[in-house]
Image (cartoon, coloured by chain):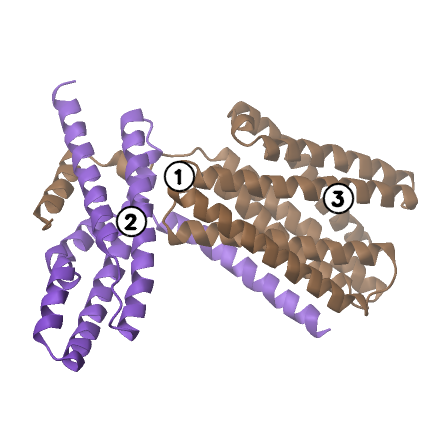
Amino acid sequence: MVQWYKFVLYYLWIAPHALLPVVSVLMLMRRLHKSFPVFFLYTLYETLGFLLRFAAYEIGPGPWYRYAFIVTLAGSTALRFGIIQEISNHVFHGYSRLETLATASMRWLTGLLVVAAILSAIYSSGSVSDDLMAGIALLSRSVAIIQAGLLLFLFLFSRIFGLSWHSYAFGIALGFGVFASTELAVSALHLTDLTEHSKDLLDLLPTGSYHVSVLVWLGYMLATEKPVGAATYSVPEMDQWSGELERTPQ
Amino acid sequence: MSSTIVFILIAFVLLVLFAYLATRRTRDLPDLDRTVTAIRSLDMEAFRNLVDPEEEEFLRASLPAQAFRRIKRERTRTALIYVKELSRVSLQFARFGGAAQRSPDPVIAAWGKQIANSATYLRLRALDASAQLLLTAAFPDLHPPLRSLLEQYDRATCLLLNHNALRRNAIRFP
């Protein structure tokens, strides 16, 4: 293995998982573990999962590493769905009338995305080898389709209705959006006939995007949520607005 | 290979969209001037007349059927422009309320929550009304029920006025 590649691979693998505990600590300090319990659990789970995978890799990248990878990936995938639900609860909290519409729309969209994922998996299954990792790539692609679709829906739906996001919820969703989009492209590429060299280079992409996601989470956790807009308007400005409204014919 | 290209393209578009939404978020802060200008530009009385069922009945009774349909189509198209503007105003209301919701002052936060909730419902009603008016433009004999939209507009603006009055009193008589 070329020296630079090994260095970059290790860096992209270790760095985000070294930063995730910082995200967990920041969440504890800001008491965000109470508002986002699933995401908090995810940061802890990912850190422990990394330690397990790293240990298995150092022992020897054989079946032990594969098992560790599959088991931690399954848990991680389930937690990501939980986080999307958690973000959705935060975004629609307090908007009682809209919440019903959003919940129903999300259910329908999930159904459609599952169908799209299954159809694309069936379409691709003929050209995919029987290898276990190819099967996992196919499953990852299906999961990425659903998760990216749901996150995009959350962003667009809230934008249509002018819903305000807490910056923490926005940061968490944005990080997952970046990761799910890259995962979609990477898992699709993994299902093609690539040379060993190309596969090695491709391995850098998901770890790289995960690094970006962790940096996004870290950035949003470090930034304090500022009260914006109306909260800072002075009373005379509000009075002017009232005056304008009173002049509006009723 | 073709499906792989499709997935890569979708992933790329998604990444661009997420980046766009992240950058827009900082620019989408509620603008008081824009909201006031939008409210000012709305002539609600004219809109009420346009969608008044009694006026429609009067036109139906006094005009030949073909002329009535033509005029109804024109009135519906004009009403649609109003509803679109109302929808835009409701978005400004919602953003304004949403921003106030994050105030450290619990009174302003509660006020913001009510405004945001009312504004999102107004937006929902406006989108629904747009769809109904589009249908009415195609089939002039339909009667789109727009009363709830007008009621919701009144409710949202009244809420805004009442809460600002409360806020004023709270500052005058702490």
Residue lying at the far top of the rendered structure: B174
The amino acid pointed to by label 2 is Leu
* Front residue (pair A200, A146): A146
- Percent position of residue A120, x then y: 70, 65
Q: Is residue A103 visible?
A: yes
Q: Which element carries disc 1, helix, strand or loop?
A: helix
The amino acid pointed to by label 3 is Leu
- Percent position of residue A106, x then y: 53, 50
Residue on which disc 1 sits: A96
> In the rendering, what colour is chain B?
purple
Residue on which disc 2 sits: B122
Marks 1 and 3, the one that precedes in the sequence: 3
Nearer the camera: disc 1 or disc 3: 1
Q: Is residue A205 visible?
A: no
Image quarter hosting the C terminus of chain B: top left
- Percent position of residue A108, x then y: 55, 54
| Cα distance between the residues tagged 3 and 2 | 43 Å
Identify the chain of the residue marked 2, using the numbered disc in the image.
B
Residue on which disc 3 sits: A73
Which residue sits at x=10%, y=77%? B63
| Cα distance between the residues tagged 1 and 3 | 35 Å
Q: Which mark is residue B31?
A: none
Q: Which element carries disc 2, helix, strand or loop?
A: helix
Tag 1 and tag 3 share a subunit: yes
| Cα distance between the residues tagged 1 and 2 | 13 Å
Which chain is painted in brown?
A
* Front residue (pair B4, A92): A92
Locate residue A54 relative to residue B37 in the image: left or right: right
